Image (cartoon, grey):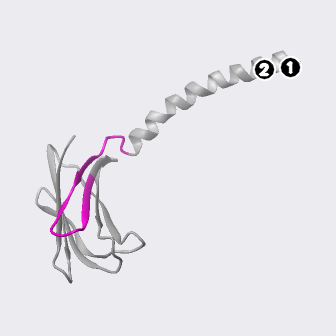
Amino acid sequence: MNITRLAGALVAGAALAVPAVALSAPDAHARHGGASAVRVAGTCTASTHAKLKAKADDGRLEVEFEVDANRKGQRWSVAITDNGEKVWSGTRVTKGRSGSFSVEKRTANRAGVDVISATATNARSGETCTATLTYSR
């Protein structure tokens, strides 16, 4: 096969491959959520920062609450609710150089609007961080 035919075959093969990749991308996107996330900054009673995020994921809601205290080893009590119903509660300890923790949970994506709330309270200092967001399909 000469170089001209080889180049033509490669170009034709690439042209066929690109649409196949483009057609498969939306399926993967839809299968793993695909909806844009709703993010809000939380409020804390001292210098800590918090944020809350929710996004659709396979017919459910993926909720992530992050607290960044910039100090590792702090123990926090955490609670997350969806429309007033408890999704998760427990204790987390800040870790790593960033002195932060996050809680990621999945919950039912109820019909209509979901109001997601998260609260974290520092066991030693009493500092509290809260965040609330509204997610609608």
Task: Classify mark 2: residues with Cα within 10 Å, few (<14), some (14-19) or many (20+).
Answer: few
| Magenta stretch encompasses residue 43 | yes
Label of residue 3 in the image: 1
- Give the residue drawn at x 48%, y 35%: 25
Residue at the far front in the pictured view: 47
Q: Mark 2 falls on what kind of element? A: helix
Label of residue 7 in the image: 2
| Vertical relation: 54 (above or below) 66 | above
Q: Quadrant of the N terminus?
A: top right
| Magenta stretch encompasses residue 122 | no
User: Left or right: where does residue 130 sit relative to residue 9?
Assistant: left
Label 1 amino acid?
A: Ile
* Cα distance in 3D space between marks 2 and 1: 6 Å
- Give the residue drawn at x 33%, y 71%: 70
Q: Quadrant of the C terminus?
A: top left
- Give the residue drawn at x 29%, y 79%: 74
| Vertical relation: 54 (above or below) 16 | below
Q: Position of residue 28 (x, y in %)?
A: 46, 40
Q: Position of residue 104 (x, y in %)?
A: 32, 62
Task: Classify mark 1: residues with Cα within 10 Å, few (<14), some (14-19) or many (20+).
Answer: few
User: Left or right: where does residue 47 sit relative to residue 24?
Assistant: left
Label 2 amino acid?
A: Ala
Residue range in magenta is 33-53
CB of mark 2 within 8 Å of CB of mark 1? yes
